[in-house]
Amino acid sequence: MNNYLSDLKQKTHEKYQELIQKEKVNQNAILASISLVQNEENVILCSLGTGSKAVGLNHMNEQNHCLHSCHAEVIAKRGFQLWLYEVLSKPNEIDKYFEKKETKYSLKKEYKVCFYVTQPPCGQAQLFPESKIYGMSAARPFSEFFQEAENIPNCDSQRLRSTPANSKTPIQQKNPSFCCTDKIMIWNVVGIQGALLNQFINPIYIDNLIIEFREHFSLKEVFDIRKRSGKSKEAVLKINNKLISKAFKIKKPKIIYTRKNLFVHSPYHPNNDELNKRINKDINQQSLQSFSYLYVDSLGTEKINSLNGLKWGLAKKDISKLQFLPKIAKYQLFQKFKHLYEHFEGKQLKCNYREVKNKNIKYLCLKLNIKQCFQEWSLNKTQYEQFQ
């Protein structure tokens, strides 16, 4: 076991305990964090997220810029992006973590990015018939998204899947986003910094994917785009036999399974097997909590209503006010980007969110290549990205 692993888990668990001190927490919580490990020793907990719910289509519209997915992995990743914005806005912090290479910043080699999650991510990572613990994830292929089909297991690894939902869940309450397994697979190609920050920094990849996992078969292939799609490295990274960019690659993070000092609030903890059996009967019971937590180093914590993707405890009159959106909603992160753009470029940004993303041609080309590797793709949500 890596020297820093126990420290990383301890810091994550302790931070979670701080967050829930005043909460009545059921033994059913999913926790994810992103940390930087400096020189294999010093652990810097950058972001932490909890949750396993996702907002339904009925809460998504062009005026409501809510957080669409409140899964722990997504919250941790968005929190890490918020952490990056904070670092890049402070010259002393930039020099601590980054070095300038040509026109962009790159994370210094002394840091490793560690992504920790207290259970296998939803989707393909849970689709193992031989599993006696995890059962069958109800993350169905996108081509079946609008079907009122039963939760019949489909283990075809070449299918991309939506966020899990019970077969009885009405269409308007389903979420059209990628399941977390597929998100991580895509992040292993495009990086976890996102399209906006990629204009200033080179891709940041997950070096170590740490999963609490009690089974004894490998999850390695489910996060590998080549294994999943059957396509070559060239099909992913090249267009017309030319590399899209030397900065992008197909990253194979080291997958570390942990079976000791498990997260005590996880339904997959050995002490909670009876609860887990009930969860497998009804995927809607996968989260008994209707809230998620976000923690970002130097920025503190935030409680999110995971049923509507807004801040927790809002009065009805405040629901439509943009200042009450979670810190990691796309709208809020875009405001951070505009400030950063003005800082680096010396002028104001006059484009909307979607237009800025479209300017990152190389990133978009890479995403298009990934899309062409599979039979299906998530539902188009560009109508929600026309904001300034």
Image (cartoon, rainbow, N blue to C red):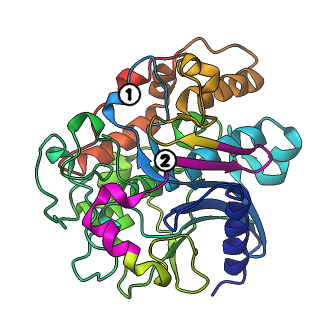
- Which residue corresponds to mark 1? 60
Q: Is residue 353 above or below residue 88?
A: above
**Residue lying farthest right?**
92
- Front residue of 45 and 132: 132
The reply, left or right, for residue 310 in relation to residue 385 is right
Residue in the image at 16% along x and 66% along y: 153
1 or 2: mark nearer the eye = 2
Residue found 36% across the figure and 21% down from its top: 383
Give residue 121's quadrant in the image: bottom left
The residue pinned by badge 2 equals 290
Question: Magenta part of the protein: which range?
Answer: 275-302
Q: Which of 173/339 is in front? A: 173
Disc 1 marks which amino acid? Met
Q: Is residue 57 above or below residue 352?
A: below
- Asked if marks 1 and 2 touch (Cβ < 8 Å), the reply is no
Q: Is residue 300 magenta?
A: yes
Decide whether residue 80 is among the magenta residues.
Answer: no
Q: Position of residue 255 (x, y in %)?
A: 49, 75
Vertical placement of residue 33 versus 322, above or below: below
Is 177 displayed left or right of 37 in the figure?
left
* Alpha carbon separation for disc pair 1 and 2: 18 Å
- At label 2, counting other C-alpha atoms closer than 10 Å, the crowd grade (few under 14, some 14-19, many 20 or more) is some
Q: Earlier in the sequence, mark 1 or mark 2?
A: 1
Q: Which secondary structure, mark 1?
A: loop
- Residue 42 picture location, percent across and down: 80, 70
Query: Helix, strand or loop at disc 2?
Result: loop
> In the drawing, does residue 72 fall left or right of residue 313?
left
